[in-house]
């Protein structure tokens, strides 16, 4: 009888231990690299809500109130004193000239549901980046990674407020996972919106309206990009602004409030047809102002500019597009290729201030 009782006790004891071991293994299997990354970054991810009154100026000189503008998006805190990165299009639209608007009102909701009024530090529509600020200290914030080290095929997790779902999940950011599908995806300067969509990070992590401005993080929980747009005619094609570029814009917005891309070349030029078959177009320099703030001593009247930093150009507007693409400012040096007395010459120009 004692042997039977002992055997039963051992059976129950081993069974409990086995169930306990299985439970522990189950808990371990749920703790993945992705879940750890989400746990690390989520406290710094916020929902962004914008509202603005709109009045239409009619052709007859009157005014008509329109439905207020309201939208939601995503953002993320980048410092414990409350600076927030998001997309510029979450904050400001390219509205028609006949519309009169009131000041933009921005509300930020942090994980847990606490709300703050946010001030706009600066907006740059070309890069589609905005910097906001909420008052307070000791905010949870996202750690920023190095987007130059991103590799195709590595894990990528998008966090944010798609379809305003953050309010339906106890005010916690919504996560979707995928991989980095491509890097350095270029869409050039959008002539309709004026946005520069270059060197983007492509991911197949699901993005939806409202994800804009939220962080794209890697498997260590560090931000590698700002989720910005999707290709509407495709599936699982989302694009993010590299965080290294975003940090540069954010620092400039913090210091100056704007991104000043105005530059002087210290010269005047006109389009010029050249080549044996007269089928190529460059810019003929007809005057060089050596007293300008630009350092242009290597250029001469009669030079024909055909390329800037290796990009073929045919107009001053194309030169400006190249400078925007390369994110250059006054004081930066650029390389020009010119034709001088039928020979190709590489010269340098330091952009001047206006």
Image: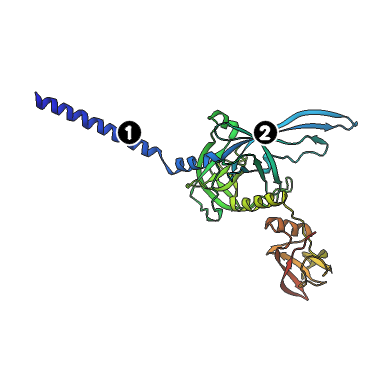
Horizontal side of residue 68 vs 200, given as left or right: right
Which residue is situated farthest in the right direction here?
A: 60
Residue sitting at x 75%, y 63%:
351
Q: Is residue 230 visible to us here?
A: no
Element type at mark 1: helix
Examine the image and state in which quarter residue 234 appears. top right
How dense is the environment of label 1, judged by Cα within 10 Å: few (below 14), some, or many (20 and up)? few
Measured as percent of width and height from the top left, residue 290 is found at 82, 70
Could you say where residue 160 lies in the image, as x and y percent from the top left? 57, 38
Q: Residue 23 carries which label?
A: 1
Can you tell which quarter of the image residue 227 is in? Answer: top right
Residue in front for this viewpoint, 31 or 203: 31
- Asked whether residue 72 appears in the rendered view, the answer is yes
C-alpha span from label 2 to label 1: 44 Å
Taking the image as shown, residue 69 lies to the left or right of residue 201, namely right
Residue 346 position, x and y percent, is 70, 71
Q: Earlier in the sequence, mark 2 or mark 1?
A: 1
- State yes or no: discs 2 and 1 in contact (Cβ < 8 Å): no
Residue 116 sits above or below residue 317 on the image = above
Looking at the image, the residue that sits furthest to the front is 137
Residue in the foreground of this view, choosing between 123 and 325: 123
Q: Position of 349 compared to 157: left or right?
A: right
Q: What element carries label 2?
A: strand
Residue 272 higher or lower than 184, as above or below: below
Is residue 26 found left or right of 229 in the rendered image?
A: left
Q: Which residue is drawn at 45% across and 40% down?
A: 35
Residue extending farthest to the top is 1
Residue at the spot of label 2? 71
């Amino acid at each position: 009888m004692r042997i039977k009782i002992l055997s039963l006790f051992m059976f129950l004891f081993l069974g409990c231990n086995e169930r306990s071991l299985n439970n522990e293994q189950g808990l371990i299997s749920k703790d993945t690299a992705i879940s750890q990354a989400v746990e690390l970054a989520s406290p710094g991810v916020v929902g962004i809500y914008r509202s603005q009154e709109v009045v239409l100026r009619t052709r007859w000189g009157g005014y008509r109130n329109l439905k207020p503008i309201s939208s939601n998006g995503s953002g993320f805190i980048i410092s414990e004193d409350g600076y927030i990165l998001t997309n510029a299009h979450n904050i400001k639209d390219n509205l028609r000239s006949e519309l009169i608007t009131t000041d933009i009102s921005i509300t930020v909701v942090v994980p847990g549901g606490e709300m703050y009024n946010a001030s706009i530090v600066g907006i740059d529509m070309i890069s589609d980046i905005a910097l906001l600020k909420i008052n307070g200290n000791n905010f949870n914030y996202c750690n920023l990674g190095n987007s130059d080290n991103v590799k195709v095929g590595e894990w990528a997790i998008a966090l944010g407020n798609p379809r305003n779902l953050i309010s339906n999940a106890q005010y916690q950011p919504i996560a979707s996972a995928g991989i980095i599908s491509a890097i350095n995806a270029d869409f050039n300067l959008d002539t309709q919106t004026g946005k520069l969509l270059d060197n983007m990070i492509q991911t197949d992590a699901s993005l939806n309206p409202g994800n804009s401005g939220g962080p794209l993080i890697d498997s260590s929980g560090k931000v590698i990009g700002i989720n910005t747009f999707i290709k509407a005619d495709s599936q699982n094609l989302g694009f993010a602004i590299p965080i290294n570029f975003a940090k540069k814009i954010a620092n400039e917005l913090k210091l100056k409030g704007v991104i000043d891309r105005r530059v002087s070349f210290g010269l005047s030029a006109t389009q010029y047809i050249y080549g044996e078959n007269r089928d190529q177009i460059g810019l003929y320099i007809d005057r060089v102002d050596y007293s300008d703030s630009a350092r242009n001593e290597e250029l001469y009247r009669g030079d024909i500019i055909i390329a800037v930093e290796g990009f073929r150009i045919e107009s001053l507007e194309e030169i400006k597009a190249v400078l925007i693409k390369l994110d250059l400012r006054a004081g930066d040096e650029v390389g020009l290729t010119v034709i001088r007395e039928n020979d190709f010459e590489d010269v340098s120009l330091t952009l001047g201030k206006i």
